[in-house]
Image (cartoon, coloured by chain):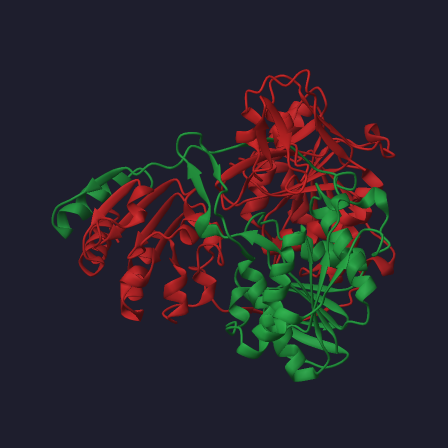
Chain colours: A red, B green
Amino acid sequence: MASIRILLDKCVGCSLCVKACPFGAIHMSEGKAVIDMGKCTLCGSCVAACRFSAIELEKSAGPKKDLSAYKDVWVFCEQKKGVVQSISYELLGEGRKLADKLGVKLCAVLLGEGLDAVAESLGERGADKVYYVGHPALKAYQDDPYSEVLSRLVEEYKPEVLLCGATTIGRSLISRVAIKADAGLTADCTALDIDPKERLLLQTRPAFGGNIMATITAPNHRPQMATVRHKVMKEAPVEKGRKAEVVKKDYPAEAYASRTKLLEMVEELGATVNLSEADIIVAGGRGMGGKEGFALLEDLAKVLGGAVGASRSAVDADWISYAHQVGQTGKTVVPKIYFACGISGQIQHLIGMQSSKIIVAVNKDPEAPIFKVATYGIVGDVNEVVPAITREFKRVLNK
Amino acid sequence: MNIIVCIKQVPNTTDVKIDPATNTLVRDGVESVINPFDAYAIEEAVRLKEKLGGKVTAVTMGPPQAEKALRDAIALGCDEGVLVSDRKFAGSDTWATSYTLSAAIEKIGDYGVIVCGKQASDGDTAQVGPGISAHLDIPQVTYVRKIRGINEKTAVVERMTEEGFDVVETPLPCLFTVVKEINTPRMPSIKGMMRAKSAKISKWTAADIDAEPAALGLDGSPTRVVKIFTPEPRKGGEIISGSAGDVAKELAELLKGEVV
C-alpha cells in the first residue's frame, strides 16, 4: 500500500507544505511537519511544494508496461453531421506544439460515415497522419461503438498522448476509453506542456471551482489522456494543400455493436445558444426582471453575433431554459466577452465564467460582487443601459 | 427494480475562500455537503422507485465522516446507505474511484439503474460515472435531462447535447448521469429525517468489496498531482459612469478591437 512520511532529519519546519496542502492535513508540531492521515489523500501537493526533499510519497512498485512502444500525439476529432467541431481544430493547434516538442507525429482520429474528404482535409490543419474509421454505426455518436473503436485504435497503434474536447461527447467517450486502456485521464485542462526529459504530458486544470490549479501527470501509464476546455487553445491555421497520410481502418462487426439506440436527434435551441463555442455571451440574472428583460439581451446578442446566457435564478424563475445556464450547476464558459447584466455575482455563477477574457457588468447595485471581477463595470439600470449598448453597436457595426 | 445512486461529499462552494495573505484555500469552518448535482440523482432515483417499486441504495466512497451524506440521502428518500471507506483508498484518482465504486456496486448486486450526478463540484471531472459503467461493462447515457419512459427491461431518455437533445433507448441495467434540468429535488420529510437518524449504514472496507489491492488508492491511480497553485485572483477593472448613451459609447470604443 502507498504511504507518505516526513523525513524528520530533512524537515526544517518552514511550513511550506502546510500552505500547499489542499486538504488541511498538515500542521507543525515542535518545529516539524506532521501529517494527519485521516485527512491526507496522498495527492502529493506537499511533496511538490517541499524545497528540502523532506516528504517521501511511496508507491508500491506495480508492474509497468513497456512505455517506449507508445509514440505520437493523437487528437480525437469530434464531428457532428460530418462537420468537424471547432474544439478539434483547437486541439490540433495545441497538439502540433506538443508533437513538435516530443519529436513525433501529430495524428487525427476521425470516426464517422462517408467522411473520406473530411479525413483528407485534416492535413491542412496540421495532422501528419489521419486514422479514419468509416461505418454507418459511427455516423452519429453512440457510447458503445465509439469507445470500442477508439480503444481498438489505441491498442493497435499505441499513441503516447491522446487529446479530446471536454464536450458532452468527449467527456462521455474518453472516460470509458481510459478505463479500457488502463490509462491516466485528466479532465478539463486549460494548459498543456511537455516535460521533454521524461516525455511527460504536463496537464494543468482548475479544481475547486477554479480556486486552485493543479498540474497532473501520468508517469507510468500510456497513453497520457486529457480532455481540454473550449476556447483556451488556439485553432490550428489552415495550410492549403498540406497533405496527411490517411490510414483507413475497418474492424469486425462486433466492434460496431451498440446496446443503446439513438432514436432521434433534436436541435431545439438554434445557432444562438451554443454557449461553449460562443465568442461573446450576453447573460442576464434576476435583475433583468422577467422574460421581457431577456428579450433586450437577445437583441444585443444578435447584434454582436453572440449567445444568451443566464444565472441560475433566472433559469429557476423560468425566464429562459436550462440550456442557457452558466455556473456551478450549468455550464462553464470562456468567451472573449461576457456581459453580466443584472447578475449580482454569487460564487456559484463566478465559477462558470470568471475565466472569460473580458467581463462587462451592468448592475444597479454598486456593491454587487460582480464588479470585483468585471473588466468594465457600469452602475445603472439594465433596462436603459442594455438597449443603449445595443443601439451603439448597431451603429458602429452598421447593422 | 432496485436502484443505486452514487453520491459524493464535497466542501460547500459558498464556503470556499482564499486567504488573501497566503493565497491558499481556507478550510476552517468549511461545511461538507452532498455534491449539488447528486441532489438531482437522488431525487430521480427516488422517483424511479416510487414508479417501479424496489429500493434505492445510496453509495459513497470517502472518509468516515461521509456517513453524514448518506444519512442526508436517506432523509431525502433513499432506503439504505453504503459507506465504502478504507485508508487503502487514499489518493484515488477517477480511475481508482470508479473501480472501487464498481466493486461496491457488484457487491450490492441486483440493480436495474445506477444514477450519478453529472459531475462533482470539487473535482468537476465528470469521469467517475462513465468510469463505473466501463468497469461494470454496462451501457451508459450521460447528461440525462429526462427519463421519458422506463420499465423492467428498457428505458427511453433524453440526453442533453450542445445543440438540444438526443433521444436514446437503452436496455437495463444501465448507468445514467443526470443534469439539473431533470427534476426539482424535494425537501427532506420529517419521516425521512427520523429514519435517517436510526438507519443502519453499511460500512465496507477494501476487503469487503473483494477488490484487487493493486487497483486501489494511489497505487491504482495512473495520475499524479505534481503541483498545486492558486491562480492570481481576478481584479475588478474600471467603472464607467455617465448617462446610458455615454456609457454605451465609451464601452463600444473600449471593445471595438474585440467585436467584429
For the N terminus of chain B, the image quarter is bottom right
Q: How many marks?
A: 0
Quadrant for residue A387, please give it. bottom left
Position above or below: A287 against A181: below
Q: Position of residue A172 (x, y in %)?
A: 66, 55
Residue A133 in view (yes/no): no
Residue A354 in view (yes/no): yes
Left or right relative to A14: residue B252: left
Q: Residue at the location (35% across, 56% down)?
A: A283
Left or right relative to B133: residue A167: left
Q: Position of residue A213 (x, y in %)?
A: 53, 36
Furthest residue to the left? B243
Furthest residue to the front? A30
For the C terminus of chain B, the image quarter is top left
Position above or below: A82 against B180: above
Q: Position of residue A375 (x, y in %)?
A: 30, 40
Position above or below: B8 against B200: above
Q: Foreground: B40 or A113?
A: B40
Q: Residue at the location (67% across, 59% down)?
A: A141
Left or right relative to A235: residue A355: left
Q: Position of residue A268 (x, y in %)?
A: 49, 69
